[in-house]
Image (cartoon, helix red, strand yellow):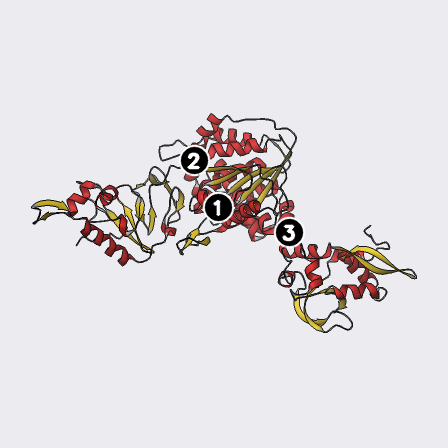
Amino acid sequence: MNKTILSTTGTPLNQQDSSSCGGYIALGMVGNKFAVFSLLNKQVQLLSPSDLKEMNLKALFGALWCELHYNEFDAKKEEVVFNHKRLATDILSACQAAGPYSETAERRVGVWKMSDGQLVVNGRQLWRADGTVLEHGIHEGRVYPVSGDVGFDLSTPMATREDVNQVLAAFNSPQWIHPMAGEIVLGFFGMSLVSTALRRRPHVLMTGPAACGKSTVLEYVRWLLGSLAYGCTGPQTMAAFYQSLAGTSKVVVNDEFEADPGKKGCKDTFEVARMSYSLQEGDEGIVRGTVTGKSKSYRFYSPFIAAGISPGKMEPADLTRWVILEAKGKPQGEKLTEAQAREFGPRLARLFISRWNVFQASEDVVRHCILSLGGDGRMADTVGTLLASYWAFVSESPATEEDAKFLVSMLGIEGRIAVHQVSDELQCLEALTSRVLPFKVVDGAALVTRHLSIAQAIEMVCKDPTGQPELVMRLAQMGLRVALAKGKWSLYVVNSPMHQELRKLFAGTKWATGGWSVVLRRLPGGEESTQRIGAGLGAAKVTVVDVPEHLLLAGNEDDMLLAA
């Protein structure tokens, strides 16, 4: 019986020899199929029992190898024959012995990180940045099949400083409103080359009026990336992402991306981008059922770079994963031809791979700088990764603390921090307090009806707690109460997702069916309590939050802003 014997490095000892190229390595079982790595075509094969036929086995594992290892004399036929049944039995036995196999073990075309922290590039060759060339196969328990071309290899010359400067000048040709926008795009390009080796994969959205140059920059990125780019127009469907991106390290280059969270294509695009930002190897990703009744996982490692006239309103979870760059006017300055970009791309990639250690060390320093200036961890991950990537193109040495401070200050970090501070809890409170409804309010000696936002109603109660009984009663009917307790003003919001008035207030938001209590509790002063919301109403579970300071300040003004 022929057995698969592996060395400690995963190299087959008995499935290949110098006189016959071919053979297999048993990987395991996928349902009732057998997963094997063909040493002939260097690819993973999933074989069903019906695939274990004579000619198919010879095609997959090599005719000469099959004859050398499985030809035997048939006494009845009085001739030498290929015993494909014995080979099929060996495959079956070896795969069953290997146990379940998951395609998460496969590292296809792209750049990956090995256990020593260094990179390995799977393209036409399998090679490391130090010049070591490996055989496609199994290394450190990972399968590296032949699966495509990354567009560069060990023989590709590295980009010069002049090459880098020319590309950077082209990225800076639009009249960007934000400082260092071109540098951010260059950083995105470098980061996207090694996306599968990263812990975080930030995205970039370029916006501005028609003909401002954003689509031109997007085209430059696509040309530079070559075969690693997945070019598309407009928000894509989940099915398109499943078929084109799952398991790959391709970069999504999306033009005419007009962000509208109300449309399914846009929601799908943001969902895949959100997952791609932080998905790690071994994670299952999105798991979907199939017609066979077995589940299939889709994993995404794709950074997104998009351009559109209208950036739309992003959710806080998306805002912190995307860097938004805005341009105005007509582009001016350097341009790249397609031929130049396709020549520069592989050379820039080869340069970045060689400076992987520079990027890693710089990333730590830049992240620490952002955190020390008040940025949060997500911001440090998003912006820090892009700045460190840019630095690896322009310096042979890691960024120092002074370098990091310079980069971060040039970026305009205060404005970025303000953007990243938008949160779900603030958005939830805004959704609640911005609703405009009719209220009966006391105006002098008269009781009149005025259209007020919930925020304005809160201001009026804080200004005159006892002078607006009708307004207080109406708020109580809505599941809200404003009270002065322990020296501070608090807002009580009923927790129950079945409260019909609150459901109406949150209609059209993602809290329309409940969940507001958990989110609001993250605000300052947030806690759960049991309180009476109003006279004649029983005690109920409520979320207590501090009334925002700006409402208290506004409540001190003499004139209230009333909506028409």
389 or 274: nearer the eye?
Answer: 274
Disc nearer the start of the sequence (2/3): 2
Q: What residue type is disc 3 on?
A: Val
Q: Which residue is mark 2?
A: 227
Give the number of the disc on residue 56.
none
The Cα–Cα distance between marks 2 and 3, rounded to whole angstroms, is 36 Å
Q: Which residue is mark 1?
A: 239
Q: What residue type is disc 1 on?
A: Ala
**Residue 70 visible, this angle:** yes
The Cα–Cα distance between marks 1 and 3, rounded to whole angstroms, is 31 Å
In the rendered view, tell whether residue 305 sits above or below residue 295. above
Count of numbered marks: 3
Q: What residue type is disc 2 on?
A: Ser
In the rendered view, tell whether residue 397 sits above or below residue 377. above
Q: In the image, is 48 to the left or to the right of 72?
A: right
Rendered-image quadrant of the N terminus = bottom left
**Residue 11 visible, this angle:** no
* Local SS, label 2: helix
Q: In the image, is 119 to the left or to the right of 306?
A: left
Residues tagged 2 and 3 counted as in contact (Cβ below 8 A): no
* Local SS, label 3: loop
Q: Disc 2 or disc 3, which is closer to the eye?
A: 2
Q: In the image, is 249 to the left or to the right of 381?
A: left
Q: Which residue is mark 3?
A: 422
Disc nearer the start of the sequence (2/1): 2
Locate residue 326, reporting x and y percent: 63, 37
Q: Quadrant of residue 282?
A: bottom left
Crowding at mark 2 (Cα within 10 Å: few <14, some 14-19, many 20+): some
In the rendered view, tell whether residue 80 sits above or below residue 219. below
The Cα–Cα distance between marks 2 and 1, rounded to whole angstroms, is 21 Å
Q: Disc 1 or disc 3, which is closer to the eye?
A: 1
